[in-house]
Amino acid sequence: LRHGVSPEASSFVLAYGFLLCDPLNSIELGTKFGELALSIMNRFQTSAFSARIEILHGMMIAPWTLPLLKSLADPKMLAHRALERGDLEFAATTCWSQAFFSLQMGAELEQTQRTVKEIVAFVSPLQQTMDLLTTQMVGAVVEQLIGHSGPDDAKQVRRAFARIEGTASALPGSLLVSDSFDERAVMSGQEPVNSFTISSLYLFKMQIATIFGDQATALK
């Protein structure tokens, strides 16, 4: 307050706005702080933080008052803008969110499959492993759904996963393996992972189990 705002200030203002919206349920005030963060961002358009702020605002604050499809600007444009400013992390994060939203919001599976392939090609050179892995998870889920769209049979969930027994890290008979993703590489430590990667993995496994009617596996 004594020295004025800096490009970094927009990140903290945005984070406070999100806290107001979510834990504190002060959506109106949180939205105003989100708008303030965008205003600060616009004063420093050359900053590496500008693309990051626009991405986070569209993912964390705008959806409280706008339909999700209108909350985030063109993900490809934002990813390239982040890349131009040297923000490799959020260039990759934007791409991952595009794949995730495409799957969760009911886009045609073939369309999501094409989107995932484009994103994997874009993210791979950036060396952002977590975003690459989670994008590949989306691709694996799509492959399973496209390949298992037959009658409604709870047992199909077992065939939606590769049936590999004896792996302590996976639910019995429900290991997520496809041409684009191999859970064994993630859970064995061959790939660097964090809690977000692991939670995403089990989120997707839960969703497949739910889709194929295996509520017991979904609850696990």
Image (cartoon, helix red, strand yellow):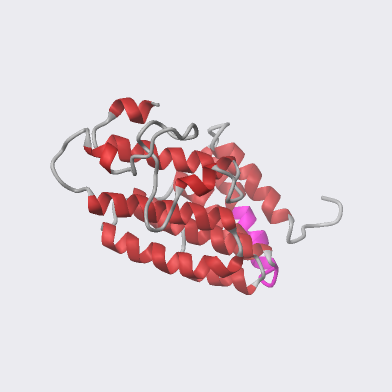
Q: Is residue 114 visible?
A: yes
Q: Residue at x 51, y 49 (%)?
A: 185
Please provide percent x and percent y for residue 66: 42, 50
Please provide percent x and percent y for residue 184: 48, 45
Residues drawn in magenta: 35-47
- Seen in the image, is 3 located left or right of residue 76? right
Q: Residue at x 29, y 56 (%)?
A: 107
Q: How many marks?
A: 0
- Seen in the image, is 110 located left or right of residue 132? left
Main SS of residues in magenta: helix
In the image, residue 214 sits, relative to residue 4, either above or below, namely above
Please provide percent x and percent y for residue 181: 43, 53
Query: Within the image, what quadrant is residue 188 found in?
Result: top right
Q: Is residue 29 visible?
A: no
Q: Residue at x 73, y 61 (%)?
A: 7
Q: Is residue 39 magenta?
A: yes
- Image quarter where the C terminus lies is top left
Q: Residue at x 69, y 72 (%)?
A: 46
Q: Is residue 28 magenta?
A: no
In the image, residue 103 sits, relative to residue 24, either above or below, namely below
Q: Nearer the viewer, residue 67 or 165?
A: 165
In the image, residue 7 sits, relative to residue 130, either above or below, namely below
